[in-house]
Image (cartoon, rainbow, N blue to C red):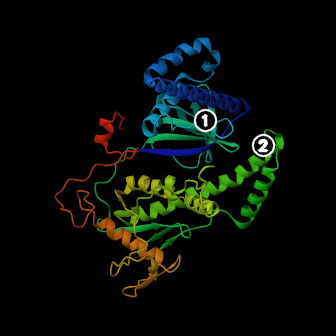
Amino acid sequence: MLQGRKYRLELTGVQAELCETFGDVCRSVWNTALEQRREYRRRGAWMNYVPQAAEMAEAKREFPWLADAPSHVLQQTLKDLERACKDHGTYRVRWRSKARWSPSFRFPAGNLITVERTGRKWGRAKLPKLGWVRFRWARPLGGDVRSATVTRQGAHWFVSFLVETGTTTPDCHAMPHTAVGVDRGVKVAATTSDGVFHDRPYATKGETARLRRLQQRLSRCKRGSSRRRAVVAKINAITGRVRNRRGDFCAQTAADLTTRNAVVVLEDLRTRNMTASAAGTAEAPGKQVAQKAGLNRSILDKGWHMLELALRNAARTTGTQIVLVPAAYTSQTCNECKHVDPKSRESQASFRCTACGHTAHADVNAAKNIKAAGQAVSGRGDLGNTRSVKRQPPATRTSSGRSPRAARAAGIPVL
């Protein structure tokens, strides 16, 4: 099983400059290769990784600064672009802006990476062209290093080792007959069908007030000024702590749910579509834009998608099955009599069925409906209660929303 191990680097001044250079070269290669792909698409042709890698080798003779970064690092950048274009489409892949993109690059050759522990809290790794770099030994590696990814978050650099642990996903969960439904909300991050509420504040009141003042100060700063860069650095320090707390909460919650349950049922939520702006255009302006913006912030703050990713990652070590069910009417259906009425949900937390009078917490009631929908899925993946259990499961969706057969027919690569 492949797992990641992330550590904070302590780079020297020269090493930090080299990492900045590597990141700038990778960003330039990404943007140039993306523009080349788009130009080929405009002409009705196709461009992929193989010819671009060959052209990059030729470009090094014309542009010597490309050789400042290791060749396999640039190749990994082209491979990442290849996967992004396959998953999202050439015109939906974003540019890497110098102001908005954090430098990141990957060393794919694990045989060229040496990791040693030098003390109780410190270790060092030998990376190509960087030499020996020190990092905080926060946890054991637990396996053989396959690759290393160096990224910058705020003012600090981090290294993530991809290691082969030698373990496999269990064929059966330790408690095979357990299941739980999870309702994700904006008031409480995750509510289970057992009546347990998983939530925590990610920012203190002082940090929230300070962040607001910094954002107001940022709006008055001139673009490109030193003062603006200083304010952005202070904002990143606060948001970085909030992001780390959110990731820690999702990891702990996922570990708890997957350890206790063989099946975890979630709503199939399209977070990116749900958090799209309602501003509209000049010809067709949107309605209730401020309210929608507040809802988007609440959804993104709770980390709905991050929790789903954490559950899938934790499920690899426990053998838990993650099931997605349609989200329609789960909050309007009574778990006792199955009556559907939007008036039954009296408030965010109160649910009173208009048919049978059943009362419960609204999120717990929704979580129980989610669990029931997940248990209706047969061993073959048939979702309907009225369908035959002997049917083969429906075709899975790709990232573009098409089935694999339809995607191949349309000429879309499917991983």
Residue under numbered circle 2: 229
**Mark 1 crowdedness (10 Å alpha carbons): few <14, some 14-19, many ≥20:** some
| Of 313 and 162, the residue lying toward us | 313
Distance from label 2 to label 1 (Cα)?
19 Å
Q: Assess disc 2: are there few (<14), some (14-19) or many (≥20) residues with their C-alpha within 10 Å of its C-alpha.
A: some
Question: Residue at 67% of width from left, 35% of height from top?
Answer: 98
- Three-letter code, disc 1: Arg
- Image location of residue 412, percent across then percent down: 36, 35
* Foreground pick, 208 / 145: 208
In what element is the residue under mark 2?
Answer: helix
N-terminal-most mark, 2 or 1: 1
User: Mark 1: which secondary structure?
Assistant: loop
Front residue of 153 and 116: 153
In front: label 2 or label 1: 1
How far across and how far down the image is residue 353, in percent? Answer: 41, 83
Q: Which residue is drawn at 76% across and 50% down?
A: 234
Looking at the image, the residue that sits furthest to the front is 283
Q: In which quarter of the image is residue 124?
A: top right
Asked if one can make out residue 194 in the rendered structure from this viewpoint, the answer is no
Residue lying at the far top of the rendered structure: 61
| Vertical arrangement, residue 223 with respect to residue 329, above or below | above
Of the 4 image quadrants, the one containing the C terminus is: top left
**In the depicted structure, whether residue 170 falls above or below residue 414:** below
Location of residue 249 (image quadrant): bottom right
Tag 2: amino acid: Arg
Circle 1 residue: 96
User: Whole-percent x and y of residue 156?
Assistant: 68, 43
Q: Which of 48 and 191 is in front in this view?
A: 48
